[in-house]
Amino acid sequence: MNNISEELSKKVQKFAKERGYENAEYLCEWNGFKCFEPIFNKVQPSYVGAPLLILVDANDNICMATYEESMQQIKDSE
């Protein structure tokens, strides 16, 4: 169970769709951010490059993570 409100989930979904993704799923808390995985196609895996994250800060500001942030989050979660 996560602590993501329905309102924030809808905002993140809208953000993802505006950038060409089908969906975004909550992953974890990391470095003070809520992390979401943007998904191109929920049914079929999409291999489109380096993994990316959608980050949400404590004020509910939403942005795409940089490549470096995405790689650091993966490293920190190992």
Image (cartoon, rainbow, N blue to C red):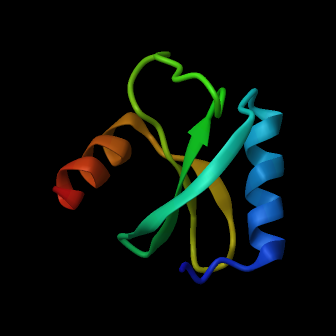
Task: Tell me where residue 67 appears, x and y as whole percent.
Answer: 38, 35
> Residue at coordinates 73% horizontally, 80% vertically from top-left?
5
Counting every numbered tag in the picture gives 0
> Residue at coordinates 65% horizontally, 48% vertically from top-left?
24
Q: Is residue 11 above or below residue 72?
A: below
Residue at the farthest top position: 48
Q: Is residue 13 above or below residue 33?
A: above
Task: Tell me where residue 13 appears, x and y as whole percent.
Answer: 77, 51
Nearer to the camera, 7 or 32: 7
Task: Tell me where residue 12 appears, x and y as whole percent.
Answer: 73, 56
Rendered image quadrant of residue 62: bottom right
> Residue at coordinates 30% horizontally, 54% vertically from top-left?
73
Task: Tell me where residue 35 appears, x and y as whole percent.
Answer: 50, 60
Nearer to the camera, 40 or 57: 40
Nearer to the camera, 62 or 38: 38
Quadrant of image for the N terminus:
bottom right
Quadrant of image for the C terminus:
bottom left
Q: Is residue 77 above or below residue 69?
A: below
Residue at the farthest front position: 43
